[in-house]
Amino acid sequence: MTLVPTINARIEKINKQIDETQSITNSEFPPYKLLIITPQKFERYLKPLKVHKEKYGITTYIATLDEIYEKMYWNGRDKAEKIKYYIKESIENWGTQYVLLIGGKVRQFNRWHLPVRYINVGNSWERHILSDLYFADIYDSKGDFSSWDSDEDGIYGEWFYGEQPEDKNIDLIPDVAVGRLPCRNRFEVILMVKKIISYEKTAYNKPWFYDMVAIAGDTYPEYQNPDWAGNEGEIYADMAIENMTGFNPIKLYTSNETLKSWKDMKSAINNGCGFLYFVGHGSATSWSTHFPNSKNWTEGFTVSHFPHLKNINKLPICVVSGCHNCQFDVSIFNLFNETRKNHGEAGYECWGWRMTRKIGGGSIATIGCSALGFTKEDKVSFKGGINELEVEFFKAYGQDNIDIIGDTWKEAINWYVSSYPIDWGIELTNDSWVDIQVPSTWTLLGDPSLKIGGYPSAMV
């Protein structure tokens, strides 16, 4: 007698869950260009950003994680995959072009306000690496959902050095532009909302915007390898500058002694600029480079120096070339992990996020690597690597006039993946390893719908 209502109740609950899962498809909502995904605790602080975006024609929907997990009840094996399925639904039903992920670590603990995906492109330095490209690469080459886990063992992007890939045919092509604000509390959310709104409303056609600061040196001194001739960082910085028609280049180079210490960098940034390009070496909390053909390094530009950045509302798009600068999973508790401490991963926050969320200055967005930043010097073919991807970003803006930052990020990755395609039928070698990791870890810490240079006031 008691089984009948229990079964009926379960059937009713299942039907309700199916209806809720289908609600994103059956809804009569208008198209949404921008999807903001956030934990509920941050939702109220994002509403001013939605209002602002829609004034400029960027229709915006704020989806909380609770809503996503409920609607994707039947889809996704874990929370990150449920988010990815929700993004897929929003692309197909709302025409979503940009996805802004809100949330980083919960304080310094190994818990997340918004889930991340670690992939497993194995090497001796780091076995698991952060990849927000996972949330952007929705479809495989056949147009089917791309799980990045073709063998369904719960280990994603699995391809270990010297072995055949266990997760094959990941096309690495972003189907939507994804950026993340790895905020740890509501104050950082409020700060970033204010910075984005102020930038888009005030930066347009300002004289400072047309300055481009390039900071570089000899990334790989020739004394270590005769094939490493020239000052590689300065060469790529010059290539980026050549693509920025109409911009005034400000070069801080070790070769002409304009770059010696962190104070040189601080002074150039404080004058304001539209673009800021670092080409050298990094860690999760620092950046530096070599003097010409020398074992000596420039004085590091570390997160401890960032309080000296006072460029107020003259905020650049920052592109940083170096390892781990945008590895947003660092923690001070890594001081107690000898390996992670030695890798430079012990800190309150990573270099890229500290630059972006700096109060009264810093950048409006930062793009960099969440893991090792491989260059052509790491490849047998001596072609490709992170520097070529960065130069393509500047070409997308300066020559192709792509002025939404998420679209420039997408364009650069699309170019790299098509230029250096992966052969999934071989053992993982240096070249494949580099060409997978370069796009997978190139992380946009910022709003992907950001209008580079802001909007004309007449548009409001």
Image (cartoon, rainbow, N blue to C red):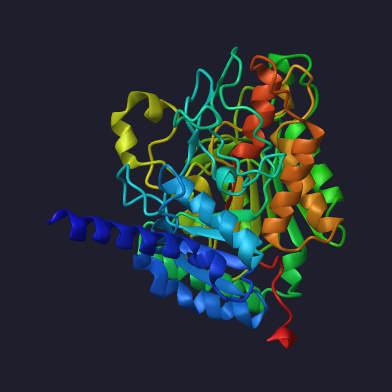
Quadrant where the N terminus is found in the figure: bottom left
Q: Looking at the image, is 264 positioned above or below residue 370?
A: below
- Residue 392 point in image, percent of width and height: 79, 45
Quadrant where the C terminus is found in the figure: bottom right
Residue situated furthest left in the rendering: 1
- Residue 292 point in image, percent of width and height: 72, 28
Can residue 372 be seen here? Answer: yes
The reply, left or right, for residue 387 in relation to residue 355 is right
Front-most of residues 410 and 211: 410
- Residue 168 point in image, percent of width and height: 62, 27
Front-most of residues 241 and 27: 27
Quadrant in the picture for residue 384: top right
Front-most of residues 104 and 23: 23
The residue sitting at 79% across, 57% down in the picture is 397
The residue sitting at 63% across, 45% down in the picture is 137
The residue sitting at 34% across, 24% down in the picture is 338
The residue sitting at 40% across, 75% down in the picture is 44
Quadrant in the picture for residue 436: top right
Front-most of residues 242 and 65: 65
- Residue 387 point in image, percent of width and height: 73, 37
Can residue 234 be seen here? Answer: no
